[in-house]
Image: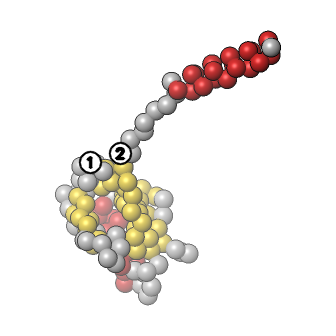
Amino acid sequence: MNRAVFATLILLLGSVSSAWAYRVLEQSEDTYELILGEVSLPRGEAGTLIFKPCADCNTTALRVSGQTRYAINGAAYELPDLLEVAEQIRQQDGGNSGTAVYVRFDIESKRVTWLGLDTFGR
C-alpha cells in the first residue's frame, strides 16, 4: 500500500512541475529559399527584393535597409559587391539556375535582415 501511495505521489509531483515549464515561443523571422533567376535584387540600401515564392503565389516585395547583412557562399559582403558578383554569376552559363538566394526577414516589419547567395558546386 505504501508503494502505491508513494508512486502516485511521485507521478503527481512530476506532472505538476512540468506544467510550469510550458512556454510559448514566437517566431520573429521567416525565410525564403529561391533561385537567382527568379529574384530581382535590390539596387541600393533602401531597395526592394522582388520575387514569387511559388508559381501560383503572388509577387512578394521585401525591403532592405542599412542594417541588412549580405553574404556569398558564407562570406560577408557589402551590397554593391554582392550585386557585382550576382551580375557576374548571371552572365555565366547556368548561373541563374545554379545559384540559391536565401532571404531571412522580420515577419512583422517585412524587412530583410540577411540576404545570401550560394553557388552550387563552385
Q: Which residue is drawn at the image coordinates 35% and 73% (left, top)?
A: 54
Mark 2–mark 1 Cα distance, whole angstroms, equals: 7 Å
Residue 10 located left or right of residue 118: right
Nearest the eye: 110 or 79: 110
Check disc 2 and report the residue beneath it.
28
Quadrant into which the N terminus falls: top right
The residue tagged with tag 2: helix, strand or loop?
loop
Q: Amino acid at mark 2?
A: Ser
- Residue closer to the observer: 58 or 106: 58
Q: Is residue 69 visible to the viewer in this orientation of the structure?
A: no
Local crowd size for mark 1, using a 10 Å CA cut-off: few (<14), some (14–19), many (≥20): few
Residue 86, picture quadrant: bottom left
Name the outermost residue toward the bottom.
Answer: 93
Q: Position of residue 55 (x, y in %)?
A: 34, 78
Q: Which residue is mark 1?
A: 108
Q: Residue furthest front?
A: 1
- The number of numbered discs placed on residues in the rendered structure image is 2
Please provide percent x and percent y for residue 26: 38, 41
| Residue shown at the point (32%, 76%) measured from the top left | 56
In the image, residue 65 above or below residue 94: above
User: Coloring scheme of the render?
Assistant: secondary structure
Depth check, front residue: 25 or 46: 25
In the image, residue 93 lies at what x, y percent?
44, 87
